[in-house]
Image (tube, rainbow, N blue to C red):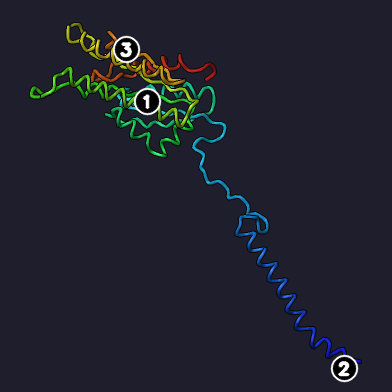
Amino acid sequence: MARALSRWWLWRLPGAIAVLAALLFAAGFVFALRGSLGEPVGEPPAPVASKEISVKPPGRRFLLVLGDSLARGTGDETGKGYASDLFESIRKAGAADMANLAVNGAESSDVARLLESENVGRLAAAADWILLSVGGNDLSHAVPREAGMTASPLETMTAARTRYASNLRRILSRLREVNPRAPIYVLGLYDPFTEDGSRTRIASSIILSWNSLIEETALSYPRVFVVPTFDLFYGRPDRLGADHFHPNGKGHQAIAQRIAQLLPPGT
């Protein structure tokens, strides 16, 4: 009996092993197929932690300054400028930080290119307020200085105004793209040469036309405010610095006070 039973296992065992191997192969094949078709194979991996670095620390507010030498504070004997004067008043209402990216001599095209930078775009996106001073160099650099120029002064100024209008739209569009909520304060232009004379009157009329352009452009964008400065310096040489072009300390303070009047209550 024992010999017959052992003979039975001898014949049946290879078949049983073959069936078991086939079942295991089929199960493995189905398991692999489910994974290749996108069905979950085991537990999903843990999500990767975000590595984004916050530009603005929690609980702090952020002021971003863009533009030219005026925004940089040139002319102020203290070295601060209107942006720092305004920032001091902002800090009295709570913790805040400021980044001043203004560059001496910058035209509107330079500021537009600066905003194409990813890092600058990140700063603009984090800002609670944005100050912009641009246009003064576009205008002053367009004034004909050489007698042999082929284009007429009127053609030169018209071309400069057209370029400025295009660049200003680029700047404001980019700022609104990355930051739809922060108020943007665009400084109007002023005339530092207000002595009597026909040339002065012509210069003032040109500056006022550029200011009208700034105001018309700002109307196309939400939460963009134009800060008038023409009246702050008209007939006020006492507010000009040693170069008789940029504001001195008192002039910068006057600009800062004008901007502060436009800030939301409780700022």
Q: Residues within 10 Å of mark 2 (few under 14, many from 20)?
A: few
**Residue occupying the point 73% across, 71% down:** 23
Circle nearer the N terminus (3, 1): 1
Residue drawn at the location 28% of the way across and 21% of the way down:
136
Q: Residue 43: x percent and y percent?
A: 67, 56
Residue type, label 1: Lys
Q: Which residue is mark 2?
A: 3
> Where does the image place residue 179, in percent across and percent down from the top left?
47, 29
Query: Which dot marks residue 80?
Result: 1
Q: Earlier in the sequence, mark 2 or mark 1?
A: 2
State the image coordinates of residue 124 (x, y, percent, origin top left): 44, 32
Q: Which corner quadrant of the image does residue 120 belong to?
A: top left
Nearer to us: label 3 or label 2: 2
Give whichever of 57, 183 is nearer the camera: 183
The residue under the point 32% across, 24% down is 134
Question: Which residue is the site of mark 3?
Answer: 230
User: Is residue 136 in view?
Assistant: yes
